[in-house]
Image: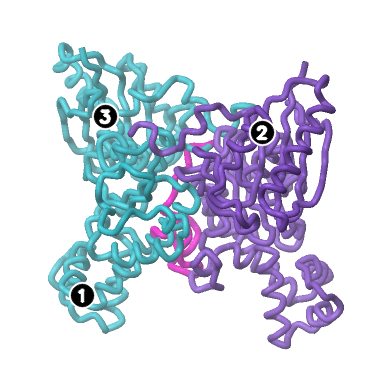
Chain colours: A cyan, B purple
Amino acid sequence: MTTFAIGVDLGGTNLRIAAIDDSGKTLDKITTSTEVARGRDFVIDEMCTAIQEIVTRLRSAGQLAGIGIGVPGIIEMRTGMLRESPNLPGWDNYPVRDEIERRLHTTVVLENDANAAALGEKWTGAGATVDDMIMLTLGTGVGGGIVLEGKIWHGMTGMAGELGHINVEPDGHPCNCGSRGCVEQVASATAVKRMATEAVASGKAPQLEQALKQTKEFSSKAVYDLAMSGDAPSKAIFDRVGNALGVVIADLINIFNVPMYVLAGGVASAWDAFAPAMMERVRKNSFVYRATAPAEGNNSDKNTGRVTVVRHAQLGSDAGLIGAARLPMITAPSDRVVAGFRNV
Amino acid sequence: MTTFAIGVDLGGTNLRIAAIDDSGKTLDKITTSTEVARGRDFVIDEMCTAIQEIVTRLRSAGQLAGIGIGVPGIIEMRTGMLRESPNLPGWDNYPVRDEIERRLHTTVVLENDANAAALGEKWTGAGATVDDMIMLTLGTGVGGGIVLEGKIWHGMTGMAGELGHINVEPDGHPCNCGSRGCVEQVASATAVKRMATEAVASGKAPQLEQALKQTKEFSSKAVYDLAMSGDAPSKAIFDRVGNALGVVIADLINIFNVPMYVLAGGVASAWDAFAPAMMERVRKNSFVYRATAPAEGNNSDKNTGRVTVVRHAQLGSDAGLIGAARLPMITAPSDRVVAGFRNV
């Protein structure tokens, strides 16, 4: 009999639930909207009902290993509470894990959504051949996930992997985090749109101005399309994105020397537009990269040697769901002890 | 019967050897110069003779756990070879570990010197209360050591922890590593001297000019003394040092969320001159720090809570020796397998 687990991707907009077996195969899937406005208890009721529905359907298929839930926000691993979640108002300091465990009588593991996505890519996606990898998710913001020896590195308060707030432009654009010039202010979808709007305001980007007029909601995809068609101001924006990502990835290579760095999220789809500047910067800034760079043209190949690979994610928006399902399969009860204080 | 180990700090100038027991107590110590010019075989002969001398003296004191050797350079952990060591010419790609094991018939563990120093501080120094810490050694260059769950993080080719090459000034001073504006180009002793020389050349630093005239070899200590006496150009140099260290430490806190960041090496002794700017920058750039900052005035106290502490190292130049002795006590044969490829 196989083992399977339930993965939940609890976003501020969508609630997605899947049953995934221990080989990574999706057995069942439900997608619904997260009715955040109806309150925390309503959402938890809906989620539990949907999980029970799937589990009932799969009763004969295998053994349930538990439930993993990816949520946007900072998780207190020890207590299974959401410390802070701007997209889930009213959930702060609520014992999410314990409440769902109480209702469903099975192991529940809560995880930050960027971490869950990194774990998904590590399991069946871009990082399937390695034990250690780092992922940057370029979405509305820039999220990060660090996988070391097959497990998410959480740090002492679950706040590790805030890679979007690595500094790249000392006097750069102010960031919500209180700093300036974080990579999130250059390489997120929000930043691409802001830089495009700034280019339009400068009066020197007629094609971007045209694109902005044609649409109610300006997208980073529109900037990408222009960059790929050769529009210089749009290309300059993605050069800046690539340069900032290159600085961060070079820093991460010099720090971790792990074999794989994965870029996910909407902006990562603009790979062709930013990757040349990014890889030029990585090569220039990191002697560790130069000492371990794969042979020319081999960068997106399956990584089987001791080389450093920077590549695009493979699982798209399923990464978080797959990673969430992986959580109960690899999390031991002792993992609820926080890092940093084992020998105090 | 206690267990003890031999720690060796094999520098380009000094060769130091100590016997240290498993409680961290130094039982015996030999310091001699490293006669690099007489060649690799001569140095290894000298080292082995000195180790045998100590082991003979301590024969009745306890059980020898093995020998740990800290060397400047990049170590290939799997093979125990020095990949690259600018300070030990002729040692590249020589099987140091196996040769000494063959001669002395005991376990030998080779480690990068900055890593060994970090491990020493972790064992009996600034990091003794935590399991996870990061150390920056501000010497001629800037070295780094990352201790996670009590062990050095090596990465896949032993090149992890190159923290001196984290970027802090995008268009800054060229670095030997091929990049520009690495923290090593702002916060090393070499950088402090260079910035002081630049200040003198600007004609606006009369006191530094005076100090430079009085001495054959200008030191970062001289710049520190002037900064503490209130000389504005000297203070500006240490503000820049502090700011650069603050950017790096804030990045590391956002990445790792470990409880302790330790500064060692000569420039770290100028703590009073650079720490105010450094801590202001850490607080500003890292929301993870702000969420975990110790109560005011508590920064140098023993770290017993879930707080982020940035502090000065405690063991001085003995850290590398103590950490080297710790190596054979905590290194399992399986640790010779490199990270990153366990499940390939």
Q: Secondary structure at mark 3?
A: strand
Q: CA distance from mark 1 to mark 3?
A: 40 Å
As shown in the figure, which amino acid type bears the numbered disc 3?
Answer: Gly
As shown in the figure, which amino acid type bears the numbered disc 1?
Answer: Leu
Q: Residue at x 65, y 65 (%)?
A: B241
Residue topped by disc 2: B103
Q: Residue at x 21, y 45 (%)?
A: A316
Classify the position of the C terminus of chain B by image quarter. top left
Q: Residue at x 18, y 78 (%)?
A: A207
Asked if labels 1 and 2 touch by Cβ distance under 8 angstroms, the answer is: no
Mark toward the viewer: 3 or 2: 2
Residue topped by disc 1: A208
In the drawing, does residue B291 fall left or right of residue A279?
right
Q: CA distance from mark 3 to mark 2?
A: 55 Å
Q: Residue furthest bottom?
A: B203
Q: Chain of mark 1?
A: A
Q: Which residues are magenta?
A: A156-185
Is B228 colored magenta in this rendering? no
> Looking at the rendering, which quadrant does residue A16 occupy?
top left
Residue topped by disc 3: A7
Tell me, yes or no, whether dots 1 and 3 are on the same chain. Answer: yes
Q: Secondary structure at mark 1?
A: helix
Percent of width and height locating residue A11: 28, 40
Percent of width and height locating residue A273: 24, 65
Q: Residues within 10 Å of mark 3 (few under 14, many from 20)?
A: many
Mark toward the viewer: 2 or 1: 2
Q: CA distance from mark 2 to mark 1?
A: 71 Å
Where A228 falls versus B74 (above or below)? below
In front of the other: A285 or A225:
A285
